[in-house]
């Protein structure tokens, strides 16, 4: 199996892009990446997306995006795994290059949810839950995550105040990120005084959908320095699934798919959790981020919120987390989120993270989740000297 590197990136600001279509967003980010790489061919295209069929009544995104990018008949396909679609698309692109099937692969993620009403966005996102046993009775992702939070707090005796420190941290990071959807700071008091979305989960503990697109260009590591002075290796990949419906799980305070995906990635990359310098985790809700930090092996169960409060996830702490704002503050354009995470890690490892740069970062991790832990994808990246 060949080693794989990222040689170029492209992305748009996350916001409500009223004047751009889903194809406009993807093409804008793709042209940026293609110009950076200056490659003369694309062998395959993978497009991560969750809800274009519902929000734009548009499927067949692979062919659509290849057409608008001006590519000459490469195999092109949409990858869907709820809000882990971007991470899964990256996994597919990695495998295509690693296997030797393709040399130059474009992997992107795109989502545009401002085209429909908020109620329709809620319904579209709920399609990632079990329709027969959860969504049918009105259980939104927020409602399901609220149940997880309540059980977690009961089991580990973690206060609302401690859990609120994660969105506060993410907004602190996003305040220095020019392409974040919500680039402003918040306080614990503001989190705790925001209205309930689904008790005990409050508004400022929840990420928001946004419009955006992000792109990576991959090639064999052995060829990477022909196209960039700062290639970043994808050193480890892991993916796993769990039951979609929460009632079928033994323990709602841990996500088995995250643990299994992380273990695969750590083993492939030959690193331990303590060697990771910077991580982009899936904090669609505060509790999801807290559990993710623990299931990835960075903190013991029940200890992540305290660690955030003590500054251990800030740059200079034990492990820098969500240094561009995470899903909560950078924004969560569902099917594109996993690619945004990878772009951010690449920027960190290149030393291009600006005011949020983690000094000496050499190993980075991304973790993308579909549904409430139904799918998990973990990638580990390594800076090349």
Image (tube, helix red, strand yellow):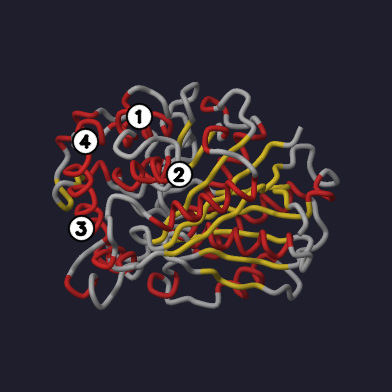
**324 w.r.t. 283: above or below:** above
Residue drawn where x is 52% and y is 59% of the image:
239
The quarter of the image holding the C terminus is top right
What separation in Å lies between label 4 and label 2 (alpha carbons)? 19 Å
SS for tag 3?
A: helix
Q: Residues within 10 Å of mark 1 (few under 14, many from 20)?
A: many
Nearer the viewer's eye, disc 1 or disc 4? 4
Residue that mark 4 sits on: 158
Select label 3 or label 1 by which is in front.
1
Above or below 112: residue 78: below
Q: Which residue is mark 1?
A: 308
* Picture coordinates of residue 218, whole percent (x, y): 71, 54
**Residue picked out by circle 3:** 143
The residue lying at 64 percent from left, 52 percent from top is 216
Marked residue nearer the N-terminal end (1 or 4): 4
Q: SS of the residue at dot 1? A: helix
The kind of secondary structure element at disc 4 is loop
Contact (Cβ within 8 Å) of mark 3 with mark 2: no
**CB atoms at circles 1 and 2 under 8 Å apart?**
no
Say whether disc 1 or disc 2 marks the residue closer to the N-terminus: 2
Q: Nearer the viewer, mark 3 or mark 2?
A: 2
């Amino acid at each position: 199996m060949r080693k794989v590197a990222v040689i170029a990136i492209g992305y748009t600001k996350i916001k409500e892009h009223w004047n751009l279509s889903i194809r406009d967003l993807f093409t804008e980010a793709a042209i940026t990446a293609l110009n950076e790489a200056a490659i003369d061919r694309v062998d395959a295209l993978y497009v991560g997306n969750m809800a274009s069929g519902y929000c734009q009544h548009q499927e067949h995104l692979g062919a659509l995006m290849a057409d608008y990018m001006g590519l000459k008949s490469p195999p092109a396909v949409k990858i869907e795994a709820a809000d882990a679609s971007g991470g899964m698309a990256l996994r597919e692109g990695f495998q295509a290059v690693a296997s030797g099937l393709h040399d130059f692969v474009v992997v992107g993620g795109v989502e545009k949810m401002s085209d429909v009403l908020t109620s329709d966005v809620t319904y579209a996102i709920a399609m990632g839950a079990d329709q027969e046993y959860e969504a049918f009775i009105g259980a939104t992702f927020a409602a399901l995550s609220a149940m997880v939070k309540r059980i977690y707090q009961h089991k580990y005796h973690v206060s609302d105040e401690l859990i609120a420190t994660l969105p506060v941290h993410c907004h602190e990071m996003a305040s220095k990120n020019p392409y974040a959807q919500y680039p402003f700071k918040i306080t614990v008091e503001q989190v705790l005084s925001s209205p309930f979305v689904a008790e005990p989960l409050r508004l400022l503990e929840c990420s928001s959908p946004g419009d955006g697109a992000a792109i990576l260009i991959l090639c064999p590591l052995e060829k990477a320095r022909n196209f960039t002075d700062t290639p970043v290796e994808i050193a480890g990949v892991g993916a796993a699934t769990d039951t979609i419906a929460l009632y079928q799980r033994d323990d709602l305070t841990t996500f088995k798919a995250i643990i299994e995906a992380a273990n695969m990635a750590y083993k492939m990359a030959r690193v331990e959790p303590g060697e990771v310098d910077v991580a982009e985790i899936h904090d669609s809700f505060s509790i999801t981020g807290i559990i993710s930090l623990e299931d990835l092996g960075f903190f013991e169960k029940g200890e992540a919120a305290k660690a955030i409060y003590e500054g251990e996830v800030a740059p200079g702490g034990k492990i820098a987390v969500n240094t561009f704002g995470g899903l909560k503050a950078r924004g969560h354009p569902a099917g594109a989120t996993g690619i945004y995470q990878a772009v951010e890690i690449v920027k960190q490892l290149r030393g291009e993270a600006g005011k949020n740069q983690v000094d000496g970062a050499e190993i980075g991790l991304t973790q993308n989740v579909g549904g409430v832990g139904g799918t998990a994808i973990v990638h580990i990246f390594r800076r090349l000297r």
